[in-house]
Image (cartoon, grey):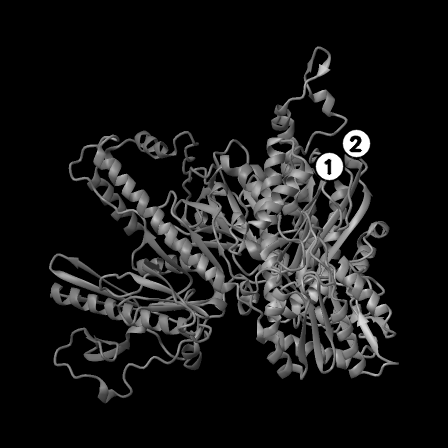
């Protein structure tokens, strides 16, 4: 058993075993004397002398002011020692071994406060009475005999022969004795940096034990239905606290102790006091039960505390009470700011409870906690309504709040009465409080467990099979079909509540103008004046009238009516060449302002009477020269377009802070031999690089000086670490707030990866045996390589996490998130199928490009489309809170993933709807933003509710007609009709590409194109096929899906719901 005194070490051991920190002693002795002189009349009761006597050691767990003073001033507890502080002298009465240690203080005490340290050594068989008379004589000498006041700690009764004699001497001395407990309480209240470090280490250990041992232990007991007593849980938890390495906390065991025996309570009997004990009763975890757990640990005698309540299949009353307590607890923590009164914490908590559930107020604990430090409960810092002391920065509090003896309304006595308790260790900072035990979550989703949701208590006997007239208890009941049905019902109820919250949130945002209407297209940027040559004399002279390309001035010279006319290459939209027999035709199409996809810019508005050349065609008998010219124009146009595009992108970049390189004090964290995506440009051989973590950002660089990328920590929105399991790569991925340039590419996603397996090809062609020794050895090498790479990445991530835990990065909320593969599903987010995986904050796909990173907090709702009707797959439409953003679609998700996705969306508090059809979202969002009031009046997003709208959709002709499975894409009479009926929200780039193609083909009529297609078919031999054979060939790829309708029936690919 660890030592239960305030100190974790005792000076009664050999004097050589310990050493007093003289610098710390001088600083604190000076602070003690300064505080004493400043507050002598009030906090120190006007005392001229302060006498402190420390009792002998005890096996009982107790907290004493005298022991706290020993540890605070000297670093250790000195049992059976008397200390007397006077203006010019400090007297110590102790044994010889302690005197040897205290002898080192003489010089420091003189320099710090001008007081001489006088040490009185008590012999082994001496009662110390003579030495005590010497101390009292010194007091009489240095103060007025009639009016001298001696301060002492009145609540500490004398223990042992030495302290009893000292008490008698004091009482018979004729001096006035006054209590100075308040003075020491105020002195210990504000912690310095070294004290706060000890508290933080203790709090980290406490929260780690709760999170990594207690919670998994309780889950295992409940899941396996084991019978374990509260007292055995207490013993196991205490052992873990005293051996921090069991929860991977690197603290020396000799510096660690418990604050009190861990408390576990359940089964209707609850005591919310820290003095409560864990009984020998078994843990009770039936439906509607409540489990309380409180643990406290100390590091170098500084205390910390955490308490959590776990709800098992909670009913509405229990859940409501916990939610109210959680809000009140957070409100009490938020009130702990410098300058506020100590009572403000309890006032804030009661204000929340009066507003949310006033009937719970009589059950609230009488305080909201106490100050905590060297003592578990610091006197004078109780968080109640009467305490008007002022909160100061550096104070530490145990914010503890609970409800006692609530009624759950169940029929079982062990579940009908319940209590709730929450406690956290909080440091008062300069601006806002810091919760040191927040690593152990208290959110309701993390403390509420559902093991037996659907079976009501009065229905349970009916569900149990009977044997010989007695009910037979069966574990299979927990996995019954009724269980699954109830799970869906609970999910439906939760979704209904989310719908209400979501509609209220959307109404507030729209009312505040949070998301204005828009189609996602920005204003067209006017181009600058294009100048190839400043005057006619700059045009190069040419003897022959032929097309020329001026690379230097980025111009092409065209012979028109006997003159060389220059055109800047940026005015060229496209250039093509066509060779026919002996002649070659060059066709150049120009950008003409005023056409649908080339709007008016500054130039066209400035010269409104100008005539523009739209197209020009040349014929040449020199095919070689024609091909060279066309190639030169295309190359020059591509270079100029790329350069201007990069220049425009760089102009929109947000200026980043400067990277601060790691100094010698901070060891640089490196991860070598990484590839980067997007890759750097250029045609040279691609090189691997090294990722380094510096003071305020990452730097990735290769051996080439121009290949360097810097990512500031402040620009990181999400960071992901995905070790290779079934994939070929291990990666680190950063999703950024603002774009950066990687080479000449503008991107918000940067990824660094290593291929864990080498791509090899067997030249022999035959399959190798699974028992082939070479094959087995090769597989083992691949496993070792994969494990080594994953370990290197994990080590780098852990070091960066430690760096991010520093105070300056607290507001950035940086953490490497890991994808949860068991929740993943296949889908098509872009053009190809990919495995999409949720994380705690995002939905990601980080293997295939383009990457997919969706922040869950930015999602408004999710609509699951094409659900039901015997479909093999369905689609997911993600609507963002910013209605200017296009709806993101993930298509072709297997129907087998539907339940898992719904469960994941529900647990992450995302509202989802189901529909049988695909929706055209752009006009829907425009309608909402144009008239938000009508949207709210009509029920908000409930128009998507499939159950509510079933009756309406049955009467709608449009809702059912023309539906085709997504696997079968029917033909349409025209390209325009197919585009109209397409349900996907098409990007602006696709529209522009289509329009450019149509512009280029304007020279040919439909008859000409039809004729060319017929000739091509005839050359391939398709013309001889019968119409029936062609229809069979078209129907073949659709498998069991319905074949497309003939041309006469032009149905849409995916009907829109208007």
Please state the horizontal and vertical placement of residue 872, each as a whole percent of the image.
Answer: 47, 34
Q: Nearer the viewer, residue 749 or 562?
A: 749
Which residue is the extreme one toward the top?
A: 468
Dot 2 or dot 1, earlier in sequence? 1
Q: What secondary structure is marked by label 2?
A: loop
Please state the horizontal and vertical placement of residue 89, each as a whole percent of the image.
Answer: 71, 80
Q: Nearer the viewer, residue 135 or 336?
A: 135
Residue 623 falls left or right of residue 1047: left
**Height in image: 727 above or below 111?**
above
**Height in image: 700 above or below 994?**
below
Q: Is residue 415 visible in this depiction of the protein?
A: yes
Residue 580 falls left or right of residue 756: left
Q: Is residue 926 visible in this depiction of the protein?
A: no
Count all numbered tags in the image, as a single digit: 2
Q: Label 2 neighbourhood size at 10 Å, few (<14), some (14-19), many (20+)? A: some
Q: Nearer the viewer, residue 124 or 552?
A: 124
Which numbered tag is attached to residue 969? Answer: none
* Real-space CA distance between mark 2 and mark 1, rounded to the nearest whole angstrom: 9 Å
Q: Which residue is mark 2?
A: 412
Look at 34% across and 49% down and name the residue there: 788
Q: Label 1 neighbourhood size at 10 Å, few (<14), some (14-19), many (20+)? A: many
Residue 238 falls left or right of residue 918: right
Residue 894 falls left or right of residue 187: left
Tag 2 and tag 1, C-beta contact below 8 Å: yes
Place residue 95 in its image quadrant.
Answer: bottom right
Look at 24% across and 36% down and name the residue there: 775
Q: What secondary structure is marked by label 1?
A: loop
Q: Which residue is mark 1?
A: 288
Q: Nearer the viewer, residue 177 or 523?
A: 177
Please state the horizontal and vertical placement of residue 1030, each as a whole percent of the image.
Answer: 31, 33
**Height in image: 107 above or below 276?**
below
């Amino acid at each position: 058993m660890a030592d239960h005194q305030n100190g974790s070490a005792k000076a009664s051991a050999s004097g050589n075993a310990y050493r007093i920190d003289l610098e710390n002693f001088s600083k604190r002795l000076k602070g003690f004397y300064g505080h004493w002189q400043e507050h002598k009349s009030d906090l120190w009761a006007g005392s001229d002398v302060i006498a402190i006597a420390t009792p002998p050691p005890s096996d009982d767990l107790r907290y004493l002011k005298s022991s706290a003073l020993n540890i605070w001033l000297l670093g250790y507890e000195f049992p059976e020692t008397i200390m007397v502080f006077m203006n010019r002298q400090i007297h110590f009465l102790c044994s010889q071994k302690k005197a040897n240690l205290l002898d080192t203080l003489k010089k420091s005490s003189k320099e710090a406060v001008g007081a001489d340290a006088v040490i009185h050594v008590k012999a082994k068989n001496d009662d110390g009475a003579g030495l005590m008379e010497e101390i009292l004589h010194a007091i009489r000498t240095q103060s007025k005999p009639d009016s001298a006041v001696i301060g002492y700690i009145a609540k500490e009764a004398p223990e042992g022969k030495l302290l009893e004699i000292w008490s008698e001497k004091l009482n018979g001395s004729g001096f006035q004795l006054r209590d100075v407990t308040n003075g020491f309480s105020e002195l210990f209240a504000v912690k310095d940096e070294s004290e706060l470090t000890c508290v933080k280490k203790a709090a980290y250990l406490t929260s780690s034990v709760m999170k990594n041992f207690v919670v998994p232990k309780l889950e295992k007991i409940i899941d396996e239905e084991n019978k374990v007593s509260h007292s055995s849980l207490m013993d196991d938890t205490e052992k873990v606290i005293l051996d921090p390495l069991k929860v991977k906390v690197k603290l020396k065991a000799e510096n660690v102790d418990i604050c009190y025996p861990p408390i576990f309570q359940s089964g209707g009997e609850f005591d919310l006091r820290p003095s409560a004990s864990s009984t020998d009763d078994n843990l009770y975890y039936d439906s509607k039960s409540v489990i309380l757990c409180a643990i406290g640990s100390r590091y170098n005698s500084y205390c910390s505390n955490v308490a959590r309540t776990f709800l098992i299949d909670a009913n509405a009353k229990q859940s409501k009470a916990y939610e109210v307590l959680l809000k009140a607890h957070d409100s009490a923590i938020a009130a702990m700011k410098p300058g506020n009164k100590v009572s403000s914490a309890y006032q804030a908590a009661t204000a929340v409870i009066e507003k949310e559930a006033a009937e719970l107020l009589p059950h609230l604990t009488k305080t909201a906690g106490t100050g905590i430090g060297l003592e578990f409960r610091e006197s004078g810092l109780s968080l109640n309504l009467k305490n008007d002391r002022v909160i100061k920065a550096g104070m530490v509090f145990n914010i503890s709040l609970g409800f006692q003896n609530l009624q759950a309304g169940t029929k079982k006595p062990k579940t009908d009465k319940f209590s709730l308790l929450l406690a956290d260790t909080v440091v008062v900072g300069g601006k806002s409080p810091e919760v040191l035990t927040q690593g152990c979550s208290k959110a309701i989703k993390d403390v509420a467990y559902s093991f037996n949701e659907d079976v009501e208590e009065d229905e349970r006997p009916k569900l149990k099979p009977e044997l010989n007239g007695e009910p037979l208890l069966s574990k299979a009941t927990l996995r019954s079909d009724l269980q699954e049905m109830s799970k869906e019902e609970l999910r439906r109820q939760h979704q209904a509540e989310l719908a209400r919250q979501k509609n209220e949130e959307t109404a507030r945002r729209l009312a505040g103008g949070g998301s204005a209407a828009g189609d996602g297209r920005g204003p067209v940027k006017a181009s600058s004046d294009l100048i190839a040559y400043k005057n006619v004399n700059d045009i190069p002279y040419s003897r022959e009238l032929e097309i020329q390309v001026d690379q230097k001035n980025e111009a092409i010279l065209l012979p028109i009516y006997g003159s060389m006319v220059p055109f800047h290459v940026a005015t060229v939209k496209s250039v093509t060449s066509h060779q026919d027999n002996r002649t070659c035709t060059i066709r150049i199409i120009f950008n003409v302002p005023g056409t649908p996809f080339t709007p008016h810019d500054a130039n066209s508005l400035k010269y409104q009477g100008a005539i523009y050349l739209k197209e020009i065609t040349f014929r040449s008998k020199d095919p070689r020269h024609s091909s060279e010219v066309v190639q030169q124009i295309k190359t020059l146009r591509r270079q100029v377009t790329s350069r201007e595009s990069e220049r425009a992108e760089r102009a929109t970049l947000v200026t980043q802070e400067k990277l601060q390189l790691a100094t010698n004090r901070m060891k640089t964290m490196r991860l070598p031999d990484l590839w980067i995506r997007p890759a750097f440009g250029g045609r040279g051989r691609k090189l691997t690089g090294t990722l380094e973590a510096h003071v305020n950002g990452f730097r990735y660089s290769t051996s080439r000086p121009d290949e360097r990328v810097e990512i500031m920590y402040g620009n990181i929105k999400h960071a992901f670490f995905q070790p290779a399991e079934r994939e070929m790569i291990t990666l680190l991925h950063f999703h950024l707030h603002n774009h950066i340039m990687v080479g000449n590419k503008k991107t918000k996603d940067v990824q660094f990866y290593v291929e864990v397996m080498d791509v090899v090809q067997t030249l022999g062609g035959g399959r190798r045996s699974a028992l082939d020794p070479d094959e087995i050895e090769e597989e083992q090498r691949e496993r070792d390589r994969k494990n080594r790479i994953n370990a290197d990445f994990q080590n780098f991530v852990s070091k960066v996490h430690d760096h991010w835990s520093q105070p300056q990065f607290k507001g950035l909320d940086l953490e490497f998130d890991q994808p949860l593969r068991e929740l993943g599903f296949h889908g098509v987010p872009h053009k190809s199928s990919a495995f999409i995986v949720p994380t705690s904050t995002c939905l990601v796909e980080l293997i295939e490009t383009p990457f997919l990173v969706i922040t869950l907090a930015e999602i408004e709702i999710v609509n699951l489309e094409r659900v039901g009707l015997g479909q093999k797959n369905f689609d997911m439409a993600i609507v963002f809170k910013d209605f200017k953003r296009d709806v993101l679609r993930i298509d072709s998700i297997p129907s087998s993933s539907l339940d898992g996705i719904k469960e994941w969306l529900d647990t992450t508090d995302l509202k989802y709807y189901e529909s049988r059809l695909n929706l055209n979202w752009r006009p829907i969002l425009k309608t909402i933003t144009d008239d938000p009031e009508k949207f709210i009046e009509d029920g908000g997003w409930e128009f998507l509710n499939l159950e509510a709208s079933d009756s309406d959709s049955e009467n709608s002709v449009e809702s059912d007609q023309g539906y085709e499975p997504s696997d079968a894409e029917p033909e349409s009479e025209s390209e325009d009709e197919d585009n109209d009926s397409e349900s996907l929200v098409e990007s602006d780039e696709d529209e522009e590409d289509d329009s450019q193609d149509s512009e280029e083909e304007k020279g040919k009529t439909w008859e000409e194109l039809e004729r060319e297609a017929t000739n091509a078919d005839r050359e391939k031999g398709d013309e001889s096929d019968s119409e029936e054979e062609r229809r069979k060939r078209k129907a073949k790829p659709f498998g069991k899906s319905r074949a497309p309708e003939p041309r006469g029936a032009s149905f849409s690919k995916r009907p829109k719901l208007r």
